């Protein structure tokens, strides 16, 4: 723990010095020249907490929930200590060791058909209509017990917990999760954090565009000043990638055997040829993504979306255009009979192509729920106000399991850049608009109007008058000093913020962000108390806007404050973004 | 098809009663939803072993404990645990709990698992650098002649040279490994980095502004590994929060601030005496909130999107150069590397896995807080000081097919009656009365008929083994007096009879269960309702019967301990009635799919 009182003065001092040349006089620095002040502890909103509380609450458990895995660890660690994948193996009965019998796998687990193709690898489905919440709770309980015993090595004593959840989690699932944590693990309080926000924190920025290439869906979230401003989603995620992998492998396999493979309707898995586990394994090992076609040249240039450079083309060619037919052999164990398939490398880009881009279709042919990822990113940028967009577009964070597909991040980035280059930030598209733009007559008139107006007014030479031998006019008068502006500028950082260009940045991940936040004791809006939850359940939550976070803070200020707070409506609690019922 | 040995699972009574009946009409995912609805009116509480939730509440008898004070079964879900010791399963070295906080959950000595096959890795000396071409690191060439050391797996022959890692010393491999990236490149550990920063801070304190030596986001930033990035970020945020606190919080929130020791209130008091000028100044500077991190010193990092090198590598190495998802999930979090994204798939990125530590835990009843299991604290011993296993409190059930003809042992023929012997064995020193109940047809898509021929019987106490041998005659006499045992038994012709016990012994009783397995053909025609016509699912061909077991016995009111007084002959004073009831599942065998 670096946050012991011994080491903290140093960072503070270092930072004060860091900022003093930019901030001008030392007077602005509160700790510096103005008045006696002991160095501050770097803990927010807990002026009364003694340093020992840090140690006492050290083992605060942070859990990040994904559709297929749970990340668990203690606050303050850089990475989670354990990662639990939800697998069918995990759902067997205790003491059922048949999985280790010879031949058992060949009987059932490796058989392609007769299973719910990947559904039993998921903790929950977002479509809660058919979901057995009790089962979700059971799965969660078992997974967490395993995590706590195997990775965290903690006992069953009650511990405070922090949950990092996707912001679009349906409230029944949230409710089931909290129920499990409160009743089975006796957590006294649970704080809820949304994963896009913690991802932003873990990248060190205040605003970002999060492209979460997840399992069930790809979610694009815009965060501005730590607030979620816009969120859109598409079904193109890891699940679709696995399905497409199956499809293309099955097609190849049928070709190999000289059969005809009828695709059938999309995403309808009737004739599974390969098991889910195998397809998923191949998808994560071998599938890669071709670079963007029209940015093969641009990617080696600076990547600036507005600049088109055509320099040394032969050099910047990418291996995919290489004429040599590189082949790869993929062993297939779950097909009947087991075989190995020799594929050209390019065949392994097909799943990725079909799952995320489908560039061979027109953009207008997609439904709202199945937009290609690059189009989704472009559209969600387009939805943002201009200043927010400028900030967000230069802080793109790729995350999620499918970000591991080699080349996919680059491809999405390039596709979006080329979309921006083609279209600019004009929401209106189509033939008529193109015609309108192409119409030179209209354009000329417009420019004339626009150009003439300011020039007509601006030229009045006799406006200035001479006083004290100096010409006073608008051009060379010193701008008036605005005290408010001055104050605002004093605190703000002088360094320029990167904005307006496409740029991707790296985040440590949602879990690590939560770890930082929790360790720094940044209060969360949504903190659920065990007693209140058991009494009231999810229905007791008030809206996030109704709960004043200031009052929550004030309660913890002193002994008197605490009592007052307890007396006067401390029962207000919220589920944050999830409690929008 | 692997033959199935008959099995018994017991549902712990702690589990949620909603598990019992799958009464959720919306539950389309459960294969038993339809029959669940049908059953609702007659017997809503029938336990369905096929329901997906029941997998979470069923345990073999060996996994269950028993609380003597609450007289209740305790399963692993309903005990509270306390940790006795932490230890490494490989070197059996006990780890103090304070180390756990600082050094993590893995063994920090030289215990490693092979990343390919999870076998234990051994340290061997690479005495002669014969394969000098594998030595990627230049500093290894200059290593002392005692020879570099490597980790090698004796099972699959994987060695750490495959990832370009060699060690100078044969001991404290963990510490050496922490300083090395794959390929042998050295890196700073967290401690070294902290010291470096402290030096830098000390330097800057003497007047050199740290901005004089800025690290550009491009150059150094690409080298920023996960641990360093996290440390930098945390440092950055701490600084920012301290600033924001100093600027803002002191002026406003100091009103409610009463702690005289805190710097905020000190400045507040000062501001009272200095007439508020200080206060004003601070209020004005309050606007400076946190900014964002700008360079790698602050934990900011640009993403490196160009993965063409990795793609090239993938093409070269092919399928064998990548690792399976299982191997990948066994990998410890690699904090010493930049974020790998897709590159973690390569075998060259694997790291030796330090052994996860394990714990010995003592278990308590969550209600009465009595200890029900307590292992010896010493790591090397496997004994328990206290262990109240349920097997010594509740009757065990053994299943075997009825001898004397009928079905072949491994599969059951559909629609043909088969008989099974259930042998209940009484572990306690009291005579127990057992009542069985099971649904007439098994729940699930394929309803087999079940008949328990003798649902109610008594099992004699678990007396001394010699008792039986010595009083064989008396024992028989007693049985005859009860009038249960006259006709039946294996000697009595081998015909199972309703209401009669098949065979009984000193502390056991066998009864017969007759089943008529259902045909395993999925219904082809659906009658009105949406019938589940899917293909056969995993384990659906196993004939499982849910059975409700109720055990009753009497103990002396005074003796709290069950089985303390073997009082079968003394029929005296106040007896206390005890009962225990639970669901269990009997797996009888596979139905052939003919």
Image (cartoon, helix red, strand yellow):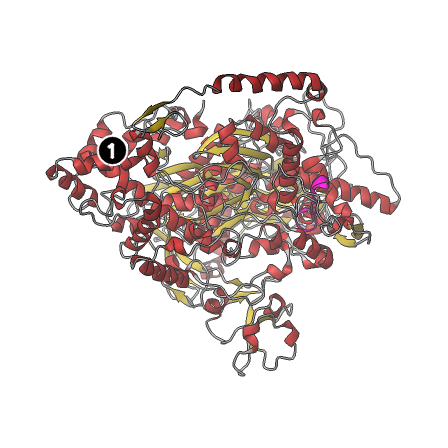
Residue depicted at x 31% and y 60%: B202
Q: Circle 1 — which element?
A: helix
| Subunit of label 1 | A
Residue depicted at x 89% and y 44%: A258
Q: Is residue A293 magenta?
A: yes
Residue A307: image location, x then y, percent: 63, 39
Front-lying residue, B192 or A147: B192
Relative placement, left or right, of A387 versus B69 is: right
Residue depicted at x 65% and y 80%: B130
Label 1, residues with CA under 10 Å away: few <14, some 14-19, many ≥20: some
Front-lying residue, A98 or A388: A388
Taking the view exactly as shown, the residue that stands out farthest to the right is A258
Q: Which residues are magenta?
A: A283-295
Q: Locate residue A186: give its quadrant.
A: top left
Residue A246: image location, x then y, percent: 73, 42
Q: Is residue A542 magenta?
A: no
Which residue is disc 1 drawn over? A555
Residue B88: image location, x then y, percent: 45, 64
Does residue B410 sit above or below A455 in this rendering? below
């Amino acid at each position: 723990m670096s946050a012991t009182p011994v080491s903290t003065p140093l960072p503070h001092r270092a930072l004060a010095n860091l900022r003093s040349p930019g901030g001008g006089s030392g007077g602005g620095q509160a700790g510096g020249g103005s008045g006696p002040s002991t160095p501050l502890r770097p803990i927010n909103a807990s002026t009364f907490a003694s340093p020992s509380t840090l140690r006492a609450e050290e083992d605060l458990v942070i859990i990040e929930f994904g559709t297929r895995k749970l990340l668990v660890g203690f606050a303050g660690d850089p990475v989670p200590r354990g990662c639990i994948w939800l697998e069918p193996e995990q759902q067997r009965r205790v003491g059922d060791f048949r999985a280790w019998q010879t031949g058992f796998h060949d009987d059932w687990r490796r058989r392609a058909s007769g299973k719910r193709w990947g559904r039993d690898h998921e903790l929950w489905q977002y479509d809660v209509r058919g979901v057995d919440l009790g089962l979700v709770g059971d799965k969660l309980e078992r997974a967490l017990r395993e995590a706590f015993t195997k990775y965290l090595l903690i006992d069953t004593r009650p511990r405070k917990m922090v949950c990092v959840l996707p912001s679009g989690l349906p409230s029944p699932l949230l409710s089931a999760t909290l129920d499990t944590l409160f009743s089975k693990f006796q957590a006294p309080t649970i704080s809820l954090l949304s994963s896009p926000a913690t991802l932003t924190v873990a990248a060190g920025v205040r605003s970002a565009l999060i492209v979460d290439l997840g399992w069930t869906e790809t979610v694009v979230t815009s965060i501005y000043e730590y607030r979620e401003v816009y969120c859109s989603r598409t079904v193109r995620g890891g699940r679709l990638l696995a399905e497409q992998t199956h499809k293309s492998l099955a097609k190849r396999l049928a070709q190999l055997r000289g059969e005809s493979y009828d695709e059938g309707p999309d995403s309808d898995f009737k004739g599974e040829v390969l098991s889910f586990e195998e397809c998923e394994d191949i998808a994560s090992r071998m599938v890669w993504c071709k670079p963007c076609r029209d940015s093969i040249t641009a990617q080696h240039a600076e990547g600036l979306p507005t600049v088109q450079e055509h320099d040394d083309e032969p050099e910047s060619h990418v291996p995919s255009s290489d004429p040599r037919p590189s082949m790869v052999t993929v062993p297939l164990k779950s097909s009947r009979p087991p075989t190995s398939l020799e594929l050209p490398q390019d065949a392994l880009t097909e799943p990725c192509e079909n799952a995320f881009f489908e560039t061979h279709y027109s953009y207008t042919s997609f439904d709202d729920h199945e937009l290609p990822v690059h189009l989704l990113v472009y559209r969600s940028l387009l939805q943002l106000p201009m200043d927010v967009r400028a900030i967000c577009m230069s802080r793109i964070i790729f995350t999620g399991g499918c970000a591991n597909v080699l080349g996919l991040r680059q491809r999405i980035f390039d596709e979006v850049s080329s979309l921006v280059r083609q279209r600019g930030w004009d929401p209106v598209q189509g033939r008529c608009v193109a015609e309108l733009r192409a119409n030179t007559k209209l354009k000329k008139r417009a420019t004339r109007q626009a150009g003439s107006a300011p020039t007509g007014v601006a030229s009045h030479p006799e406006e200035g008058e001479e006083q004290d031998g100096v010409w006073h006019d608008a051009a060379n008068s010193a701008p008036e000093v605005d005290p408010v502006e001055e104050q605002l500028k004093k605190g703000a950082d002088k360094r320029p913020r990167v904005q307006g260009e496409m740029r991707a940045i790296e985040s440590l991940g949602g879990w690590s962000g939560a770890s930082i936040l929790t360790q720094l004791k940044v209060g969360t809006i949504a903190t659920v108390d065990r007693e209140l939850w058991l009494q009231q359940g999810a229905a007791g939550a008030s809206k996030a806007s109704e709960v004043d976070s200031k009052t929550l803070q004030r309660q913890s200020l002193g002994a008197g404050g605490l009592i007052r707070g307890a007396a006067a409506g401390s029962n207000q609690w919220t589920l944050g973004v999830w409690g929008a019922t | 098809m692997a033959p199935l040995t008959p099995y018994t699972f017991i549902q712990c009574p702690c589990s949620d009663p909603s598990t019992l009946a799958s009464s959720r009409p919306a539950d389309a995912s459960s294969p038993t939803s339809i029959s669940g609805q049908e059953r609702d009116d007659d017997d809503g509480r029938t336990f369905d072993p096929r329901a997906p939730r029941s997998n979470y509440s069923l345990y073999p008898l060996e996994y269950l404990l028993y609380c003597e004070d609450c007289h209740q079964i305790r399963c692993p879900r309903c005990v509270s645990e306390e940790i006795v010791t932490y230890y490494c399963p490989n070197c059996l070295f006990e780890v103090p709990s304070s180390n756990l906080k600082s050094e993590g959950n893995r063994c920090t000595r030289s215990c490693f698992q092979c990343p390919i096959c999870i076998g234990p890795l051994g340290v061997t000396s690479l005495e002669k650098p014969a394969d000098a071409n594998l030595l990627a690191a230049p500093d290894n060439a200059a290593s002392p002649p005692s020879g570099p050391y490597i980790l090698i797996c004796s099972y699959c022959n994987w060695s750490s040279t495959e990832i370009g890692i060699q060690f100078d010393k044969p001991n404290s491999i963990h510490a050496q490994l922490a300083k090395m990236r794959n390929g042998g490149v050295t890196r700073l550990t967290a401690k070294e980095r902290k010291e470096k920063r402290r030096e830098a801070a000390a330097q800057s304190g003497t007047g050199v502004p740290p901005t004089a030596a800025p690290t550009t986001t491009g150059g150094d930033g690409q080298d920023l590994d996960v641990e360093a990035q996290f440390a930098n970020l945390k440092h950055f945020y701490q600084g920012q929060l301290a600033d924001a606190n100093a600027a803002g919080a002191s002026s406003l929130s100091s009103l409610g601030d009463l702690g005289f020791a805190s710097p905020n209130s000190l400045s507040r008091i000062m501001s009272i005496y200095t007439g508020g000028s200080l206060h004003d100044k601070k209020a004005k500077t309050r606007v400076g909130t946190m900014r964002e991190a700008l360079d790698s010193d602050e934990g900011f990092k640009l993403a490196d999107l160009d993965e063409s090198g990795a793609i090239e590598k993938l093409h070269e190495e092919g399928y064998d150069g990548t690792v399976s998802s299982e191997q990948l999930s066994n990998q410890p979090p690699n904090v010493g590397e930049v974020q790998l994204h897709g590159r973690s798939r390569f075998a060259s990125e694997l790291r030796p896995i330090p052994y996860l530590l394990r714990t010995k835990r003592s278990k308590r009843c969550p209600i009465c807080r009595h200890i029900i299991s307590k292992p010896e604290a010493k790591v090397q011993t496997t004994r328990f000081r206290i262990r109240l296993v349920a097997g010594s409190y509740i009757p065990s059930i053994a299943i075997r097919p009825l001898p004397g003809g009928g079905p072949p042992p491994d599969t059951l023929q559909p629609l043909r009656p088969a008989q099974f012997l259930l042998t209940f064995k009484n572990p306690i020193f009291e005579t127990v009365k057992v009542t069985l109940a099971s649904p007439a047809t098994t729940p699930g898509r394929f309803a087999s008929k079940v008949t328990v021929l003798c649902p109610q019987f008594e099992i004699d106490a678990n007396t001394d083994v010699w008792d039986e041998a010595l009083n064989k005659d008396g024992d028989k006499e007693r049985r005859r007096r009860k009038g249960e045992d006259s006709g039946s038994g294996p000697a009595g012709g081998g015909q199972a009879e309703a209401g009669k016990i098949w065979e009984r012994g000193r502390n056991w009783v066998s009864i017969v269960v007759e089943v008529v397995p259902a045909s395993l053909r999925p219904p082809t025609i659906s009658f009105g309702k949406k019938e589940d016509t899917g293909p056969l699912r995993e384990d659906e061909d196993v004939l499982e019967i849910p059975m409700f077991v109720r055990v009753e016995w009497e103990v002396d009111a005074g003796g709290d301990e069950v089985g303390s007084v073997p009082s079968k002959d003394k029929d005296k004073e106040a007896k206390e009635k005890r009962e225990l009831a639970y669901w269990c599942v009997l797996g009888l065998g596979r139905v052939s799919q003919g």
